[in-house]
Amino acid sequence: MNRLTSLSGAVLLAAAAVAPLPGHAAELVVLNEGFRNVANLSDWAQINRSVPPGTGWFQGNTDVFTSYNGPDNAYIAANYLNAANGMGVVDNWLITPTLTLNGLSTLSFHTNRSGETGFFDQLEVRFGFGSNTSADGFDTLLLTIGGDLTFPSDWARWTTNLDVQGEGRFAFRFLGDAATLDYVGLDAVRVVTAVPEPSSWLMLLAGLGAVGATARRLRK
């Protein structure tokens, strides 16, 4: 019986030893979207601020290119027709659901463009605190892809990190003169955030308490 009690304490100590220590963090996936059904996206916002406004974001067109993973059309796309008839200024936003972030967080995604020459597709990635979708609220620019820089014409993975406590949303903004834009796709959007593990201390204290109780019983 004494051996069994001692073993219980040892098991608790072992469990505490393999758990993350305070100050370390586990990753919690708060968003994982593969765009298999754009029409049924839950809690995403699609806001077309183009002048004049045309089409919005839409299900991937397999005649242009196929998805990064999943079914061939499982990605979301935007193009020059986001401005009516392809004439005007495109300013088309795709905004994630409101996410609760807890410290160091990472956004990752894949993007692609049609590869047609003579066009300068541009995609911005922004962050805004809270749950609103006002453009003025997304004042943290995290990435700019394309424009005067190279926009890969094959699926490429991008990541960006930020340290945030509280609620916020990420925004993908397709923008530019419609005459200079063609077609872009977005796939495999994922956000992970750090989660403290205070339970590690509780497990350790429980293990020490069990060992201490065993020692006291043995002395009696």
Image: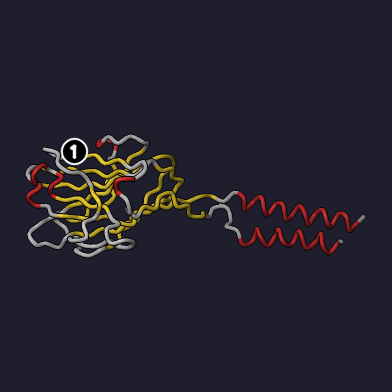
Quadrant assignment for the N terminus: bottom right
* Residue 81 appears left or right of 95: left
Closer to us: 194 or 134? 134
Question: Relative to residue 204, is residue 49 depicted above or below?
Answer: above
Question: Relative to residue 158, is residue 165 depicted above or below?
Answer: above
Q: Residue at x 51, y 55 (%)?
A: 26
Element carrying mark 1: loop
Question: Relative to residue 131, is residue 124 depicted above or below?
Answer: below
* Residue 28 appears left or right of 85: right
Q: Residues within 10 Å of mark 1 (few under 14, many from 20)?
A: some
Closer to us: 143 or 100? 100
In the image, farthest residue toward the right: 220
Q: Locate residue 139: give its quadrant.
A: top left
Q: Residue at x 43, y 49 (%)?
A: 30
Q: Residue at x 32, y 40 (%)?
A: 128
Q: Residue at x 76, y 59 (%)?
A: 8
The x, y position of residue 48, in whole percent, is 20, 40
Q: Locate residue 113: give its quadrant.
A: bottom left
* Residue 130 appears left or right of 102: left
Closer to us: 14 or 77? 77
Question: Relative to residue 114, is residue 202 depicted above or below?
Answer: above
For label 1, the residue is 49
Tag 1: residue type? Arg
Number of numbered discs visible in the structure rendering: 1
The x, y position of residue 10, in whole percent, is 74, 62
* Residue 191 appears left or right of 9: left
